[in-house]
Amino acid sequence: METINLLPPGLWPVMLTPLKETNELDLRGLQELTDFYLEAGANGLFTNCLSSEMYQLTAEERLTITRTVAKQSNGRVPVVSTGTFSEYMPANIDFIKRIYDTGASAVVLITGILARNDEEEDVLKSRIEEIISRTEGIPLGLYECPMPYKRLVSAELMKWLADTGRFVYHKDTSCHIGSLQKKIQATQGSSFGLYNADTPTALDSLEAGARGVSPISANFYPELFTYLLKRFQHSGRTPELNQLYSMLLVMDKLVHTFYPYSAKLFLQKRGLRIAANSRIPTESMTQADKLRFDALFDMFHTLASRHTINLVLNPKSSIHNL
């Protein structure tokens, strides 16, 4: 079995892709966004993922954003990036190598791309075996991406993946603590770390041994998750931490609406110099929606003040004035 270095525990934001008003890549904005995540305490970065609008990017754009983030990170934290976008395995294998050559620490495989929803898990396993045999020791990750459909994997497959020694990152979207516990147990003691995408099960999964969290709400207020993780690692689930966690659960429902446009708008409001443009069509926000996001912004600042959390960016005007 090959030896692969562990990825660090903690917060792994699923990165946005800033776009210009013309909908072209905004690489200056992406560099600034990368620094923002790192200054906010991110321990690793997942770029070229669903939050990055990866299905709306060309192959060259996927390579460009991965290369840009890896270069801007400059070894401060590891960067992982998606490498499978085709039902044709040779194309996936070639693109995995190209993504790795950009400077990514690991290349992530999409479960719903590698096998159709009417195919058994053994089919998925056989295709992963082919990737392992033809990618020359490249560290790999797995992503239960909701698109094109959410394909969850079993604890048995997770153990097999861990035993190969090639897997280091798993973005779990099962949103079920029973499933999370089984997967964590199956990969215990290996290089294969589970990073939970789901805020409602975040603390339970950390108690069960998850290596970290990777929620979309970390695109709005990563500092709150950095604080949550550090306090949990230091003192466990204290009453104070449970209060913060309860507020994050209430806030979590709203961040999923109008996403990723809403996250870009929120960061713009926080002071990041990016446009709110997205290639993913979204409905227009009503005045009530804008007021809800203003309330979310106020809640975020109230929590940061209550827990004396230093914030990376200064606020601009309110959302309904943008």
Image (cartoon, helix red, strand yellow):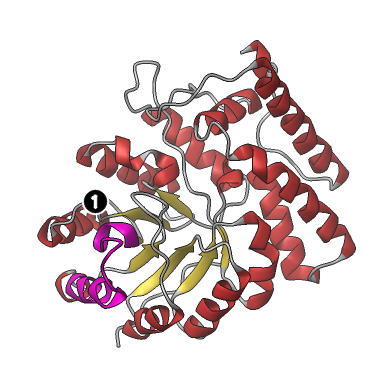
Q: Quadrant of residue 135?
A: bottom left
What residue sits 47% from the left and 26% below the top? 282
Single out the residue that lies furthest toward the front: 118
Whether residue 205 is visible to the viewer of this picture, yes or no, is yes
Name the kind of residue labelled 1 in the image. Answer: Phe
Taking 320 as reference, is 50 left or right? left
Taking 8 as reference, is 83 left or right? left
- Give the x, y percent position of residue 60: 21, 39
- Give the x, y percent position of residue 43: 55, 57
- Give the x, y percent position of residue 94: 14, 57
Query: What is the secondary structure assignment of the residue under circle 1?
Result: loop
Residue assigned mark 1:
85
Crowd class of label 1 (few under 14; some 14 to 19; many from 20; radius 10 Å): some
Taking 89 as reference, is 4 left or right? right
Main SS, magenta region, reads helix
Single out the residue that lies furthest toward the left: 90
Q: Which residues are magenta?
A: 111-131
- Give the x, y percent position of residue 127: 20, 71
